[in-house]
Amino acid sequence: MEKGKVFLVGAGPGDIGLITVKGLDAIKQADVILYDRLANPKLLEFAPNKCELVYGGKLPERHFMRQENINDFLVEKALQGKIVVRLKGGDPGVFGRVGEEAEALAQHQIPYEIVPGITSGIAAPLYAGIPVTHREHAESFAVVTAHDKSKDGKPNLDWESLARGVDTIAFYMGVGNLPFICENLIRNGKPSTTPVILIQWGTFGRQKTLQGTLADISAKVLEAKFSNPSIILVGEVISIREKISWFEKKPLHGRQILLARTGTSPSVLAKELMALGADVIEFPKWKKTPLPIDVLKAAAFEKILFASPESVEEFFTAVLEQQLDIRTIKADFYGASIKTIKALNSRGFKAHLAELPGDYLVVGDDSILIKGYENVMVTGKKEIDQQFMPIFKRMLGEAALNTMVFPSSAAVEPFIKALSECGISAAELLKDLQVISMGKQTLDAVEAVGLRSDGMPEQATKEALINYLEGRQ
């Protein structure tokens, strides 16, 4: 059997927009992805449907896979002829143990590529408004491990060189050793008044910062119960943060949103919410298996209802493939949602919002919407992607949700059912969240299943939702 290939990929610091083009290309062709805790799980949604997703995360108190097991896994899968992606948070060459993994692959003569990523020691400070170098404040920069493999985990460093010879120091994952770090820097010549900042979950919408000096930051961390994953930055350049801080000023920064999902395509709404500073977890994750359709059937109907934006794409792709003259279809087009109508409009067709029930030919996947209709054109089999269920549960464990958004009435029941499959009660999960329903139909659907809804934007549009979240309604 021909050997496969391994890509050792840096996922970047958290914001999914910070992965490299080459890294994303590797994900899109992967047969297997072994990912760690600090790689944003949303990147896994770019993988092919049949890709095997394996968690190899490491927590301070436990490892799901030890390094030797990770090395063996990469070799085993590559020897099976598969394209394997080892997805690591940040840059694989900065405390990512990529050297050990590459050595194991080289030993077995397995082809591999190392794809650099943006390291959190640079990205997290920038998202906190701090460049690690500056002509007036910092001409040197160092990245330093804040723990090592010794029994007590305290790094054996050249403290005098760090204290006297480096302007800006980024310590990785060192909250537990912070008093030890501060004591050694002060003892070796760093002024106790030197600014220090901790940046937790840097570049995520839930990014938090805590600022102090070498003299008082340890006490502040204990009081605030600040924890990893955090970058500890030390240096005078921190002083310019007040002038150029930008990320934490985004209007939705601090919003941690759970968004009920109905489609298989990337959500435009989720993307816009994240661009405004929010963290967004979409649930559930759907996958679709395409089915062959006979578009000639559509010519016999006066009304065609498209169940989703994806169904519009699938229908017109089939029209082109089967070389059907679209003028033979005389029907009026209808959409089950505003998004679906916009998908039809983008193809040059006027469409109306459907009034249900009605005498339609319904085009869509085998979802709830088309059940109960006599005339249907099933474009695909849509089902929850079970591989993402444990991923979702881990994302919930890392997040501190404060907002729930139901974008449509069709999203309500599948969301509750999927939560139940995860062993999670919807009422319990949402009890302390602000629950927002987009539109009167959605509000009714939420209340019909016994859930509380705290409010509704004036219109069922993403613009109205954003205004609502920003407090402008």
Image (cartoon, rainbow, N blue to C red):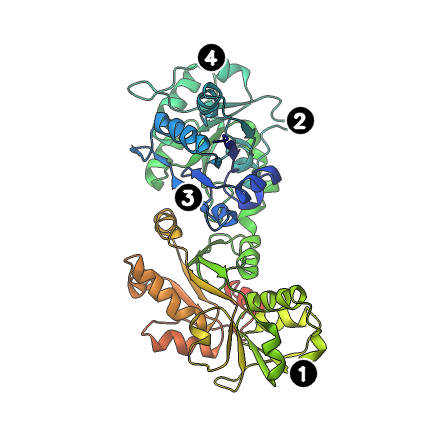
Q: Earlier in the sequence, mark 4 or mark 3?
A: 3
Numbered disc in front, either 1 or 2: 1
Circle number at residue 160: 4
Mark 3 lies on a secondary structure that is strand
| Structural distance between the alpha carbons of marks 2 and 3 | 45 Å
Q: Which residue is mark 2?
A: 135
- Left or right: 38, with 297 as reference point: left
Q: Nearer the viewer, residue 105 or 280?
A: 105
Numbered disc in front, either 1 or 4: 1
Is residue 245 shown to the viewer in this render?
yes
Q: Earlier in the sequence, mark 2 or mark 3?
A: 3
* Identity, as a three-letter code, of the amino acid under mark 1: Lys
* Identity, as a three-letter code, of the amino acid under mark 2: Arg
| Structural distance between the alpha carbons of marks 1 and 2 | 68 Å
Q: Position of residue 348 (x, y in %)?
A: 71, 72
Q: Position of residue 218 (x, y in %)?
A: 37, 31
* Identity, as a three-letter code, of the amino acid under mark 4: Glu
Q: Which residue is mark 3?
A: 53
Q: Which residue is mark 1?
A: 330
- Left or right: 50, with 398 as reference point: right
Q: Position of residue 464 (x, y in %)?
A: 56, 69
Q: Earlier in the sequence, mark 2 or mark 4?
A: 2
